[in-house]
Image (cartoon, rainbow, N blue to C red):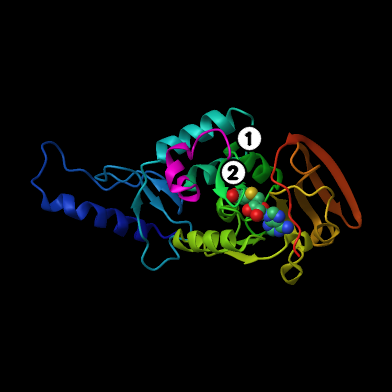
Amino acid sequence: MRYDLLWIAAVALLLPAACAPAPAGPPAMPVVVETATRGTFEVAGSPTPVRVPSQFPMTATPVLTPDPYLESRKRMVDTQIRARGVADARVLVAMETVPRHEFVPSDMVDQAYNDYPLPIGYGQTISQPYIVAVMTELLHLKATEKVLEIGTGSGYQAAVLAELTDQMYSIEIIPELAQRSRALLDRLGYRNVTSEEGDGYWGWQEHAPFDAIIVTCAPDHVPQPLLEQLADGGRLVIPVGPPGGYQSLWIITRQGSEYRNVNWGGVAFVPLKRGE
Ligand code: SAH
């Protein structure tokens, strides 16, 4: 773990303070409280916590930006996610790390951490934080596993998954959303997300098999290509049901040529569209 870069970053933040008149009392030491290499950090001398991009410390020149939304995000995780039973510590950290406010329309930033989905244009939505966390937990991802998402949308779910694994693939059928989410994921440093525009009904054969597949739009049946592209032991988390209504969220686990289906419960997703 590259603590040295964190220290350099912390010292760089403190430099302006060093030029100001000395405050009364003992000098503030640059103390990095957290030990993770990514996430949001309290840095002594910085008025607000600092968010370290997910690729840090691989990035040569990390951009450390003040993160005024950290408190809202912690509250979101505590009250909407942990309190409702999501317990996987890695998932909770990922939800606390990804800056959801970056993924919502600029006139809705103040609602980014609220307990509901928000529109992202083109008739689509960014899912409610709780549902994102539940679906992520159901995938039981290990850091070395490969995951495919159908329905990139805003890119938020992709970013959450990219906090948990280095091999994240995502497909979006609406060209404008595919381009916008790609640009945003690049800006935020999520270089471990490979994305493309296309009809995710067909999966992504080139990169198959996948240890986990998550579908964030609802088909009325389980697409056969997704079942085929699951690795042995792989998990598919998918809402299935009539368009425009409620669907059931299914967890489908592959064991060789056998598939085991578990129904998690009722959800409401936008329909999976079909390409021309
Ligand atoms: N995971 C997204 C949720 C977006 S809503 C997020 O975190 O923001 C579902 C998305 O699925 C929409 O953007 C929609 O355009 C997309 N979609 C619908 N049908 C699709 C298909 N056949 N292939 C790929 N994406 C599809």
Which three-letter amino acid code belongs to the residue tagged 2?
Val
Query: Marks 1 and 2: in contact by CB < 8 Å?
Result: yes
The circle on residue 39 is none
Residue 93: image location, x then y, percent: 53, 43
Q: Earlier in the sequence, mark 2 or mark 1?
A: 1
Q: Secondary structure at mark 2?
A: helix
The circle on residue 86 is 1
Q: CA distance from mark 2 to mark 1?
A: 8 Å
Residue 123: image location, x then y, percent: 62, 48
- For the N terminus, the quadrant is bottom left
Q: Is residue 271 magenta?
A: no
Q: Nearer the viewer, residue 1 or 164?
A: 164
Image point (22%, 52%), residue name: 14
Q: Which residue is mark 2?
A: 91
Dividing the picture into quadrants, the one containing residue 177 is bottom right
**Magenta stretch?**
101-117
Q: Secondary structure at mark 1?
A: loop
Residue 86 seen by the camera: yes
